[in-house]
Amino acid sequence: MAPSTTPPPPDGLLVVQPLRRRHCAECRSGPLSLLVLEEGAPRCLDCADLGHLVFLPRGDTALTRRSREASGLSAVVVRFNRRHGRYERQGVLVEEAALALAEERCLADAEARRRRRVRDARRRAVEDARFTEVFAREIQRLFPGCPAERARAIAAHASVRGSGRVGRSAAGRALSPGAVTAAVRASARHTETPYDQLLMAGVPRHEARRRIASSVERVLREWRLREAV
Ligand SMILES: [Zn+2]
């Protein structure tokens, strides 16, 4: 017997997508796109009393699970894969009302998830803004001579990495005098000295840092003074 006529014993109702042209042994309709084997003989879905079910292709696990749960009668649809030598699941047949209900529930879930994402994004934006503000204030406290605009830019850049997103403790660490000074120093290095040009000219990073070190420290000293120079 050809393998396509001997699907595995069903765990529940099994419906087959035949590879060959098959007709219903009872009403002779066909060729059938879906059939049920009853004692080896193909039956159309109507003769097998499954004609009222609708096909749900595989792929959406949650929708499939919910549809089957809500369906008083359901069946698994399989097709023989010649290359793999086995029957493979194609989807399920479920009651249309069950599918509609399952779709509603999945949509409600997706909508709930979307609303939660919007809330989370809004909260993160608020946290980021608050972190940037606190960071900028801390820069101005340690470096009163640093122009306010620069302090805000440095803080905004730092908050991209150090915001509430990485947790309170990490944010606290990011606000330590050492971390704030490091952020200011990095910014001064790139904007107040020819560091970037040196790197672009092929000067090794450590050598470039050595050459601009005194300029950076001079800028930091100036910014530590109360009045901008
Ligand atoms: Zn039939």
Image: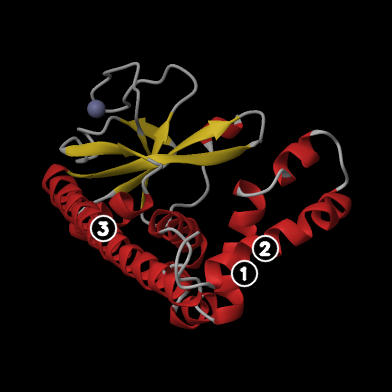
Residue 1: tell me if it is visible.
no
Going by the numbered disc 1, the residue's amino acid type is Arg
Q: Which residue is mark 1?
A: 221
Residue 153: tell me if it is visible.
yes
Report the side of 36 relative to 198 (left or right): left
- Whichever of labels 3 and 1 marks the residue nearer the N terminus, that label is 3
Please name the residue shown 32% across and 50% down the image: 64
- Disc 1 to disc 2, C-alpha distance: 5 Å
Going by the numbered disc 3, the residue's amino acid type is Arg
- Whichever of labels 2 and 3 marks the residue nearer the N terminus, that label is 3
Q: Which residue is mark 2?
A: 218
151 lies above or below 208: below
Going by the numbered disc 2, the residue's amino acid type is Arg
> Dot 1: what SS?
helix
Give x and y (percent) for residue 124.
32, 64
Q: Residue furthest left?
A: 97
61 and 28: which one is in front?
61
> By what rule are the colours in the image chosen?
secondary structure
Q: Quadrant of the N terminus?
A: top right
Pointers 2 and 3 in contact (CB under 8 A)? no
